[in-house]
């Protein structure tokens, strides 16, 4: 991969790289996303970054809503959970009736960990979005940033490796 294509230039600044998961060449290869089972490169980097941003925002909204409900349940004079118990449905009703828990305790057990996990996930996803937005803004791929190499260096190393393999094959053929 990348040897049939021209080396990186101002027009195409990133080398084409082979993805060993998909078994295909990807222009401006960034990484293989195991969650989407797809290579992220020149053709889909922006939509992938937008997807990450949307998931991060959704996670933040859901954890904020969970924290809001939890804060209202924890108020000393809160009574709305009593009306929820009157509908005789849902996990909270089953836990109260079946296990003998008080309604406020059930809501604390359900919403407390969900809120903490949601905020932790939101923070992690926001960091990931920020990292990739910085890479996009600086014009680097993940491989270039993590390994500290340039696209030209990757291309030259791949070319040298290919030339060494070709010379080894030629030498082995001549010995026979």
Image (spheres, rainbow, N blue to C red):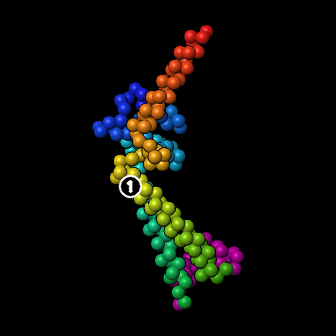
In the image, is residue 123 part of the stretch drawn in magenta?
Answer: no
- What secondary structure is found at the residue carrying circle 1? helix
**87 in relation to 32, above or below:** below
The total of numbered circles placed on residues is 1
- Residue toward you, 135 or 111: 135
Q: Taking 153 as reference, is 80 left or right?
A: right
In the rendered image, the quadrant that contains the N terminus is top left
Q: Main secondary structure of the magenta part?
A: helix
What range is drawn magenta here?
Answer: 77-100
From the viewer's side, name the closer residue of 129 and 142. 142
Quadrant of residue 112 within the rendered picture: bottom right
For the question of whether residue 27 can be seen, the reply is no
Q: Nearer the viewer, residue 49 or 81?
A: 49
Task: Give coordinates of residue 7: x percent, y percent.
Answer: 37, 32
| The C terminus: image quadrant | top right
Query: At which x and y percent is residue 60?
Result: 45, 67
Tell whether position 96 is magenta: yes
Q: Can residue 101 be seen here? A: yes
Residue at 48% x, 48% y is: 146
Q: Position of residue 52 (x, y in %)?
A: 43, 55
Q: Is residue 6 left or right of residue 169?
A: left
Seen at 42% across and 28% down, the residue is: 3
Image quadrant of residue 30?
A: top left
Q: Identify the residue under disc 1.
A: 134
Residue at 42%, 34% in the rendered image = 155
Residue depicted at 50% across the width and 75% down the height: 67
Residue lying furthest left = 11
Instruction: From the top left corner, tell me how far across and down residue 161 is, in percent.
Output: 50, 28
Whether residue 98 is situated above or below residue 153 in the rendered picture: below
């Amino acid at each position: 991969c990348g040897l049939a294509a021209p080396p990186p230039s101002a027009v195409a600044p990133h080398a084409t790289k082979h993805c060993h998961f998909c078994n295909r060449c990807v222009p401006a290869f960034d990484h293989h996303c195991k969650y989407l089972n797809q290579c992220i490169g020149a053709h889909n980097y922006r939509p992938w970054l937008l997807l990450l941003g949307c998931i991060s925002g959704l996670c933040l909204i859901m954890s904020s809503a969970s924290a809001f409900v939890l804060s209202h349940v924890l108020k000393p004079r809160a009574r709305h959970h009593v009306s929820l118990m009157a509908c005789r449905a849902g996990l909270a009703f089953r836990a109260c009736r079946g296990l003998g828990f008080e309604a406020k305790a059930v809501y604390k057990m359900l919403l407390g960990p969900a809120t903490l996990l949601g905020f932790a996930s939101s923070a992690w996803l926001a960091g990931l979005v920020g990292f990739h937005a910085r890479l996009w803004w600086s014009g680097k791929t993940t491989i270039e940033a993590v390994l500290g190499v340039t696209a030209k260096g990757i291309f030259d190393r791949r070319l040298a490796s290919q030339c060494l393999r070709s010379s080894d094959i030629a030498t082995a053929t001549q010995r026979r």
